[in-house]
Amino acid sequence: MSIFRFIHTADIHLGSFLHISGMEKHPKLKELSRKATYQAFENICNIAVENKAAFILISGDLYDREARSVRANRFFVDACRRLEKERIRVFVTAGNHDPAKEYKELFRLPDNVYVFSASEPELILVNDTGGEPIAAVSGQSYGERWERSPLHAHYPVSDADVFRIAMLHTQMETGRSNYIPASSADLSGRSGFDYWALGHIHQPQIIKEDKPVIAYSGAPQGRDFGEQGLKGCWLVEVEKIGGVSCFRANMKFQVTSPVIYHTFFIDIGCPELAEAESFDQLEAYLIEEAEKLEEKIRAEHSLVEGILVRWEIGGRGRLHFLFSEDIEGSQDEIRRLLRTSLGHRFPFVWTDSVILRTKDPAAEEVLVRHPMLKEYLDQIIMDIRQGEPARKSLISQLGQMWTQKADYEDMDEKRFFLDESTLENMLDEAVQLILNGLIEAGGRE
Ligand SMILES: [Mn+2]
């Protein structure tokens, strides 16, 4: 028997803008960059109203520190007033981007909104419209930008026979974490809870499916290429399936993001491109790929207004010789072509960037002809890929600009994190440079 529904969201970062390259000259893109986080929150509210949700949980980072604004405050209050009329409650915990110390609403919040205290854990009992208790929500806000203590360890648990929810803004790291140290075992070990509504990680994820559910909703709108794909919130339907404290949570992911980020990986060696040798042929193929995605999104997700696209073009093939003389110029030209031909559709497909990583097909032949060289290169690559000492020495020689560890939200933009894909790309390019050098030196055979 279904008892009620609720929505789990987090990391709305209301008021922050999207990064869209080239938007300066395009009012439509500029507007979308400014309105996307607002639109995503409005979509959440619409989903709550349509599904007669009892409440919405916002597990931290409702606002964005840098983008804190009167407009964002006003927007939130107005949206909550509308929810109040529909008898939908809103529970908010402050996260690291909107800690209680800096959290100040400029307008009076309507009575259906509850913001959890930062000074102590609290428990709120929720009744249905008939006055019967249906759920208990426990939570605590971040007081400061960092929260290093396991707040959840002290969350009160309701003793009523209701669905028990805990809200937590955490990176789910054990040991020393700036964002509430916790593990899935810690959370499961806190008996009594049915659902852990997590925030902080922007990718939706179900860590544990049942008894208790542990889930991240992810951000309702991605803000850069690190946050790709469809973004949304969880619509959770709670069922009573037996005696005391026996509930089931049926979770449905609802897409809310008006904009999605998408990377296409294109291989110039694929059958459709293997014989191609002009920009026109490449362009026609890329447009076809973009159209396929556009059609799929339009058919399945009517809320999506735009798709921001990055093209990573790699592989070996004849097209390589078209680009190799002037890689940057080629990237710019392909981007320009695609922006012109794809920018006017709905949902529109906007090319953010084109990255060319194609390879000379002859390079592979050099390796075939010189097995010793191949073995030697493979060995070096293997050492770097797998060997801690090789990596350490790389970092000690070149590491001024590398951070050792990616702190999820507080990345230093002047540094870059040496992650697996960056390292793979670097190794790949290094091998190509060596092979190209050999080809140049030896002449083409
Ligand atoms: Mn956060």
Image (cartoon, rainbow, N blue to C red):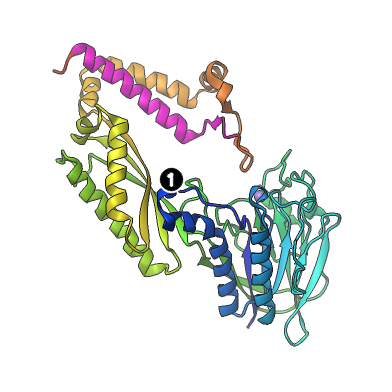
Q: Give the image location of residue 282, x and y in percent.
A: 21, 44
The stretch of residues the image draws in magenta is 413-442
Q: Quadrant of the C terminus?
A: top left
Q: Give the image location of residue 403, x and y in percent.
A: 59, 29
> Which residue is depicted at the point 73% across and 82% down?
128
> Which residue is depicted at the point 53% across and 60% down?
35
Q: Quadrant of residue 433?
A: top left
Vertical order, 360 against 246 (above or below):
above
Q: Is residue 127 visible from the viewing direction of this image?
A: yes
> Which residue is depicted at the point 22% across and 49% down?
285
> Which residue is depicted at the point 42% across and 24% down?
382
Q: Is residue 271 visible from the viewing direction of this image?
A: no
Q: Quadrant of the N terminus?
A: bottom right
Toward the right, the furthest residue is: 119
The residue identified by callout 1 is 21
Toward the top, the furthest residue is: 441
Residue 426 magenta-highlighted: yes
Q: Give the image location of residue 183, x and y in percent.
A: 69, 48
The residue lying toward the viewer, choosing from 337 and 194, is 337
Residue 34 magenta-highlighted: no
The residue lying toward the viewer, choosing from 361 and 414, is 414
Instruction: Report the side of 97 relative to 321 (left or right).
Output: right
- Neighbor class of circle 1 (other Cα within 10 Å; few <14, some 14-19, many 20+) is some
Q: Quadrant of residue 58?
A: bottom right
Q: Magenta segment, principal secondary structure?
A: helix
Q: Quadrant of residue 115?
A: bottom right
The residue lying toward the viewer, choosing from 215 and 328, is 328
